Amino acid sequence: LVSKNSAMCEGHSVNAGALWLLLVTAVERLSPIVDVQRVYVTGYSMGADVAMLLAARHGSTLAAVAVFSGQYSRLVGMNAAEARSELRDLPVRAFHASGDAYVPAVHTKNMFGWLCDAVDAQPCESSAKFKDPSPPSWDPNAEVEFTISVCTNRSEKAMWLFQDYVYQGEGDYK
């Protein structure tokens, strides 16, 4: 819907107000065929940033939000108490690869901490490791490992940080 060359972009961020107006207009025009109770917002990188801003400002009108690899600097700068009513009942899933060198995963960790604060909860972390269901041909025993954090108040908010492994050749992995 929005690219970095869009008129809605201001430098390296998206005008959240303009995007919200565009989304509302599109949903209104499509309302005969769109279930307005099931509008989900998702975003990757810069889109993740604006998706979480929309959630903090208009979350009570959304069904859920899923974000991938954002920086969230504008969100984390917001007053969490102001966003509380919008985020309280909104399911949120945040995903990030722990080895992301372009947008470090610490940004998603910080956002998730802010999110749990906004809904009066503490993050609770656990780890999981599974056999890769679709392993690469060069590593038939590959495993998928990630850290899962949830807000402790059963608010359907979770963050998944995927652990990366890099094939080094001859069976060595990093």
Image (cartoon, rainbow, N blue to C red):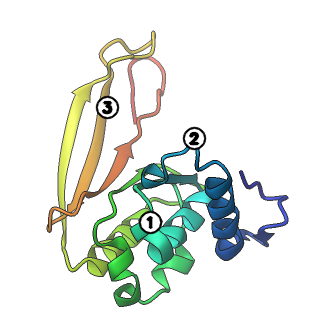
Residue identified by numbered label 1: 61
Question: Toward which corner of the image does residue 125 lie, by quadrant?
Answer: bottom left
Q: Secondary structure at mark 1?
A: helix
Closer mark to the observer between disc 2 and disc 3: 2
Among the two numbered marks 1 and 3 on one chain, the one whose residue lies closer to the N terminus:
1
Taking the spot 59% from the left edge, 66% from the top edge, the residue there is 50
Q: What residue lies at 60% left-to-right and 56% top-to-bottom?
A: 102
The residue nearer to you, when weighing 17 against 127, is: 17
Q: Could you say which disc has been placed on residue 146 in the image?
A: none
Above-or-below relation of 32 to 86:
above
Q: Amino acid at mark 1?
A: Thr
Please provide percent x and percent y for residue 46.
Answer: 63, 61
Look at mark 3 in the image and give the residue it sits on: 144
In this rendering, is residue 41 above or below 18? Answer: above
Mark 1 and mark 3 residues within 8 Å of each other at the beta carbon = no
Q: Residues within 10 Å of mark 2 (few under 14, many from 20)?
A: few
Judged left or right of residue 94, residue 26 is: right
Residue 144 location (% of width, % of height) = 31, 31
- Tell me the element at label 3: strand
Marker disc for residue 33: 2
The local crowd at label 1, few if under 14, some if 14 to 19, many if 20 or more residues have their Cα within 10 Å, is some
Residue at far front of view: 32
Distance, label 2 to label 3, CA atoms, is 39 Å
User: Is residue 51 among what the camera can see?
Assistant: yes
Q: Nearer the viewer, mark 1 or mark 3?
A: 1
Residue 98 is at least partly visible in this image: no
Residue 42's x, y, as percent? 52, 52
Contact check, label 1 and label 2, Cβ < 8 Å: no
* Residue at x-position 38% and y-position 19%: 171
